Image: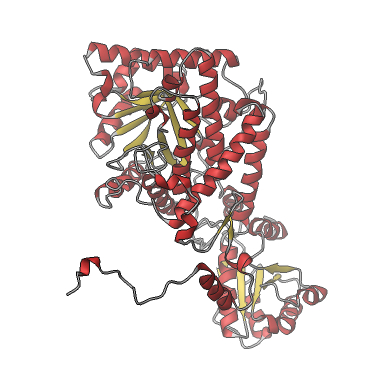
Amino acid sequence: MADKTKQKLFEEFPPVTTQEWKDKVIADLKGADFEKKLVWRTIEGFNLQPYYRVEDLENLDHLKYVPGEFPYVRGNKAKCNCWYIRQNIDANDAKVANKKALDVLMKGVDSLGFETCCKSEFTNEEFETLLKDISIADIELNITDATAAHPFVDFLKAKIEAENIGKNEIKGSVNFDPMAHLTLNGNFCKVQSEVFDTAKELIEKAKDLPKFRTIGINAEMFNNAGATIVQELAFALAMGNQYVNLLIEKGLDIDTVAENMKFNFGVSSNYFMEIAKFRAARMLWAKIVEAYEPKNLEVAKMNIHATTSKFNQTIYDPYVNMLRGTTESMSATIAGVDSLTVTPFNKAFETETEFSDRIARNTQILLKEESYFDKITDPAGGSYYIENLTNSIAEHAWKLFQEIEAKGGYVEAFKAGFIQDQVTESANKRLLNVATRREILLGTNQYPNAQEKIEASIKEECCISTKRDDAIAEPIKTLRGAEQIETLRLRTEKASETPKVFLLTIGDLTMRKARAGFASGFFACAGFEVIDNLGFNSVEEGVKAAVEQKVNIVVVCSSDDEYMDVAPAVLEHLSDKAITVVAGYPKSVDELKAKGLKHFIHVKSNLIETLQGFQAELGI
């Protein structure tokens, strides 16, 4: 009897070539163009195929590496995928922050991020209060703002010595990043040369703390300004490389500089692309550090903290933000980040609550304790799709990185406006994609809850992008993709009377139901009241019902073939009693326009411009 453990499965099925697959797909498309129909052109500028096969891996050099091996594309760790669960805490009131920190440390958090951006000075007494009863050797400890960096490192060294704590036990960071200050404010906080002298002093001050990092590279701000994944990665590499250059010029060696750097990335809902981004990031950074010939190649490991995106958070239907945060956390942890902060779902419009903090914290705990994401290193490794994504992102990010280097590095490229132009272009594309619903924000531009009302306004964060009086360049501005639609809807909420939209469904049953569903979701995005109907036997019957309801807008929902008869008749019977709209964009659109019909809503409509137009007509 044959040994079944050595038996090859599916031997009876002949192998199928890639060309045979493609021929079958083309046949099923029935004449439609393969490239236009199935190949996805990303906003990053490269194409993604509808499927990948083993031969697509043949020319990918990074596949020969294993987890924990240079250039760390498969992760910094060889035996696990563990990460720190970080919760950020407002530390401007040290006593309140300490109480919260002690509470969350008992609930699964093992990394604290103290936010000090509204405070200009900290005393040792305040630091003592902040860390009271916290075992700093057992957690990762992070200060998120540059202002507190120097005094905190001084305090930490004194505390370690006084309490006889092992220097190797202290893990964490201070986020000293003058280039981020330049990017968000248009200039450095002091003279450029002084800023990097300060960076050098900070590194030297913390040289006895091998697991404590002092220089931050905050690429998260690009993510939250609407940049693409490739841009976020390329800008981070450029910032990191310039820090290395400048600090080596000031007398430090590559080993010392590299092991003091921490990269902070955002992570968006583009699930597989984000997994690939972090893998590509480690690989490219390792190659950059290698070029400086470090004595210990281990310093080429990119230490990554990830924060789930604020760009795609919404005010309306905010609980959907929990779902976004979950998929973003999955991307980051599958990709092997070193620590993660889940942005609370209500961050866009109010101060975090006990509930929102708990959900953010538990998102990570569930991924660890119930999904075992920390057990398998690089679970995405070997995926035809993700390996090709990793390669494409790496190639395009490297090309953009080289463009920045050719301009003299990050600072010079920023002064020349190159960085801002790149971010603005991609942000405008993304906002247009939101407006045309190519990029979906569930509950906001797709499937909104028309009955939902909000009274909250967008929260002004203490660390916002502001242009200084002495700015040497225009700062980038962080934003959210939903802002324009939310502003539109808030305008409706504040109107003296909510506009009523009547769906006049008539004719072909399938088409009228489909178009009524589309029209209902379209107008609900602006908070209009939508009145649906089962259908009318005649135009007169439908118009009569609409007039009786005292509606502002009547949407004709029917089939393309019936519009030539139905739509003009509705317009004639309504006269000036309401605005007539056609759901769809039939081939007869020019003839319909000739008959006086002005308004058409369809899948290619710019949601924001169209709804703003209706608001203007209704005097809102």
- Give x and y (percent) for residue 511: 59, 80
- Give x and y (percent) for residue 56: 49, 57
**Image quarter of the C terminus:** bottom right
**Residue 24 in sight in this render:** yes
Please tell me which residue lies in front, 604 or 494.
604
User: Image height check: is 346 above or below 123?
Assistant: below
**Residue 315 in sight in this render:** no
Residue situated furthest left in the rendering:
1
Please tell me which residue lies in front, 463 or 181.
181
Which residue shows up at 70% across the image and 81% down it?
563
Q: For residue 474, which quarter of the picture?
A: top right
- Give x and y (percent) for residue 202: 43, 15
Which residue shows up at 45% across the image and 12% down it?
201
Please tell me which residue lies in front, 529 or 179.
179
Residue situated furthest bottom in the rendering:
537
User: Image height check: is 343 above or below 617?
Assistant: above
User: Image height check: is 208 above or below 478?
Assistant: above
Left or right: 477 in relation to 578? left
Please tell me which residue lies in front, 463 or 139.
139
- Give x and y (percent) for residue 253: 45, 17
